[in-house]
Image: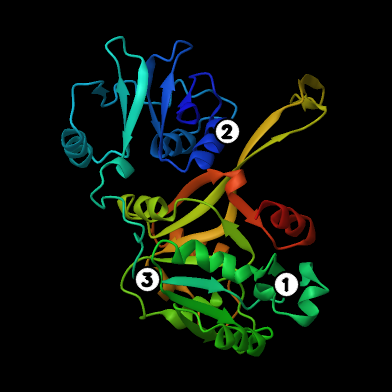
């Protein structure tokens, strides 16, 4: 119970980490007496970040101060489930007559299969697996980067499992470098899901190979780099993309950097204006995971190197809508070079 409650003075960055750890989509905001002040959903948090809130700010302006509640001893399980469905909630706090939080009701308490484990069935996934992976040499002198092992499995299996756990069964792998080794691996593996290989005769960058898939999809689909593992809510990501009416959504990691020195600000005459002591800077960093609508594939030129940043720029120039889905930094595991690879081995 304690892990689902937070105080209003918690920072946005810390509450992102708390949400990531709980696996829930909602937290209860309480005061020092455990009296309910409100609720904070992952959607509330995203809206605050996208509106420009600093990661070091507290959540006092982010949470819902008028949440739906249940009063202890005055509701049945069926009534709570009906209310949750009607208002499309993920969690409802239960309070006593003094507004003290005593429990909560979540979708897992409904007992009617309302929280299906397979929420992304039939959603295609594309994994860009054709790069040389020079930053992981000497492993990649022998193996294609997707087959570099992390514990007992290669990177690409860790990536695929993030999707198969939610029901995805259709995977498209763009391949070039050491593609025969990668194909042989899946032939030997004989997975329960379908794997289709998209051949790049020449390296086509981080998005060029997607052009070969034009006309194959009739719904939004995921695109992932082959050297990242994202521990986020993929169903929420897809919902965010669809509800926002986006053509492209990129997943961005919240990073806060502190300069360990005093930085000098100059005035227009080149004289010292003031010194910022150990300033904080907030960034949303592109992780390499995306949701795309099929219509953007026509923007990709045929048979030439083309990167995802080019696709995003061209989509914006054509009036397409591009969204950003923030996640906690701890939810992003980058195994693209050795320092991050060692960290990934420790985290997984």
- Residue indicated by mark 3: 294
**Circle 1 sits in a helix, a strand or a loop, which is it?**
loop
* Quadrant placement of the C terminus: bottom right
Estimate how packed mark 3 is, as few (under 14), some (14 to 19) or many (20 or more) residues with alpha carbons within 10 Å.
Answer: some
Q: Residue at x 49, y 80 (%)?
A: 191
* Quadrant placement of the N terminus: top left
- Residue indicated by mark 1: 133
- Quadrant assignment, res 90: top left
Tag 1–tag 2 contact (CB < 8 Å) = no
Q: Earlier in the sequence, mark 1 or mark 2?
A: 2
**Image location (x, y in percent) of residue 41:** 39, 35
- Residue indicated by mark 2: 13
**Image location (x, y in percent) of residue 301:** 50, 78
- The dot on residue 70 is none
**Circle 3 sits in a helix, a strand or a loop, which is it?**
helix
Q: Is residue 115 above or below residue 293?
A: above
**Image location (x, y in percent) of residue 295:** 36, 70
What whole-number distance in Å separates the C-alpha atoms at marks 1 and 2? Answer: 31 Å
Q: Earlier in the sequence, mark 2 or mark 3?
A: 2
What whole-number distance in Å separates the C-alpha atoms at marks 2 and 3? Answer: 33 Å
């Amino acid at each position: 119970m304690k892990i689902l409650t937070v105080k209003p003075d918690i920072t946005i960055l810390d509450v992102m980490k708390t949400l990531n750890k709980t696996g829930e989509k909602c937290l209860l905001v309480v005061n020092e007496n455990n009296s309910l002040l409100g609720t904070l959903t992952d959607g509330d948090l995203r809206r605050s970040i996208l509106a420009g809130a600093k990661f070091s700010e507290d959540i006092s302006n982010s949470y819902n101060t008028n949440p739906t509640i249940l009063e202890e001893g005055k509701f049945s399980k069926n009534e709570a489930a009906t209310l949750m469905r009607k208002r499309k909630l993920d969690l409802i706090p239960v309070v006593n007559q003094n507004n003290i939080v005593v429990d909560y009701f979540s979708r897992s308490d409904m007992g009617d299969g309302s929280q299906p484990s397979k929420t992304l069935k039939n959603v295609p996934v594309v994994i860009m697996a054709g790069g040389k992976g020079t930053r992981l040499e000497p492993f990649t002198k022998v193996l294609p980067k997707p087959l570099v092992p992390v514990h007992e499995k290669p990177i690409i299996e860790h990536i695929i499992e993030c999707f198969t756990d939610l029901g995805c069964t259709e995977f498209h792998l763009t391949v070039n470098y050491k593609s025969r080794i990668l194909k042989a691996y899946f032939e030997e593996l004989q997975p329960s899901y379908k794997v289709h290989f998209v051949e790049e005769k020449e390296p086509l960058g981080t998005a060029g190979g997607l052009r070969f898939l034009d006309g194959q999809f009739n719904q939004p689909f995921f695109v992932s780099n082959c050297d990242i593992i994202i521990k986020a809510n993929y169903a929420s990501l897809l919902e965010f993309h669809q509800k926002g009416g986006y053509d492209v959504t990129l997943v961005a990691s919240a990073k806060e950097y502190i300069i360990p020195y005093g930085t000098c600000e100059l005035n227009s005459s080149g004289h010292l204006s003031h010194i910022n002591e150990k300033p904080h800077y907030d960034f949303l960093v592109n992780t390499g995971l995306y949701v795309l609508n099929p219509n953007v594939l026509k923007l990709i030129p045929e048979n030439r190197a083309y990167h995802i940043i080019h696709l995003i720029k061209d989509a914006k120039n054509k009036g397409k809508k591009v969204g950003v889905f923030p996640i906690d930094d701890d939810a992003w595991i980058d195994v693209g070079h050795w320092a991050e690879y060692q960290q990934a081995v420790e985290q997984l």
